[in-house]
Amino acid sequence: MKNYNLSAIMGRAWEIYRTLTGDRIAKLSYAMKFAWAEAKVPADEILNGWNITKLEKAGANRWTKYGKDRVYLSRIGDALMGLELDFYKSGNVCGAWLNNEKISNRESFRVGEAYSRAYIDLASGKVYECVGRYADDFMEKLNATFHA
């Protein structure tokens, strides 16, 4: 069972209470529920400067086996880079846009190459397998968004 700082929760409840208007009992009930909800939210997990919780919420996959701890970035790359793809029924790319600007299908593969096999080794905090023409741009956006 998790230990909560009841004094801090009650203090926060009274802060919330003072901002509300209306019935005293309803205000106190709402303030207590809200303060408890805030207290129960898990803190972000940060390892070697990377916000793991935020990465996982964005769609990154965490892999821990054989003494290794990694976060794979392939699923968050498109959104991070601003890459949008349309596909034919066959699965081939029929249209691609990078930051709302039309690009060739081949160029979309070059963008995806930067992060298709990229991962963060959480033991060292380094990013591996980030290659290609767009690797620097990807790393810049990754650091700005997920590095604590």
Image (cartoon, rainbow, N blue to C red):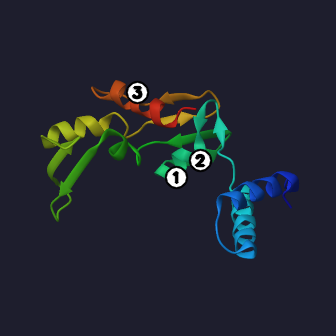
Q: How many marks?
A: 3
Amino acid type of the residue that numbered disc 1 sits on in the rendered structure = Lys
Instruction: Identify the residue position indicated by label 3 in the image.
Output: 140
Res 48 quadrant in image = top right
Q: Name the side, left or right, on which 36 lies relative to 123.
A: right
- Numbered tag placed on residue 57 in the rendering: 1
Q: CA distance from mark 1 to mark 3?
A: 19 Å
Q: Quadrant of the C terminus?
A: top right
Q: Name the side, left or right, on which 18 lies relative to 114.
A: right
Amino acid type of the residue that numbered disc 3 sits on in the rendered structure = Glu
Position of 118 relative to 74 (above/below): above
Instruction: Please tell me which of labels 1 and 3 falls first in the chain.
Output: 1
- Name the residue located 45 percent from the left edge and 42 percent from the top edge: 73
Which of the two residues, 117 or 7, is positioned nearer the viewer here? 7
Q: CA distance from mark 1 to mark 2?
A: 6 Å
Instruction: Identify the residue position indicated by label 2 in the image.
Output: 53
Amino acid type of the residue that numbered disc 2 sits on in the rendered structure = Thr
> Marks 2 and 1: in contact by CB < 8 Å?
yes
Res 15 quadrant in image = bottom right
Q: Name the side, left or right, on which 38 lies relative to 92.
A: right
Give how far across and how far down residue 50 sits, in percent.
Answer: 58, 35
Which of the two residues, 31 or 42, is positioned nearer the viewer here? 31
Position of 75 relative to 87 (above/below): above
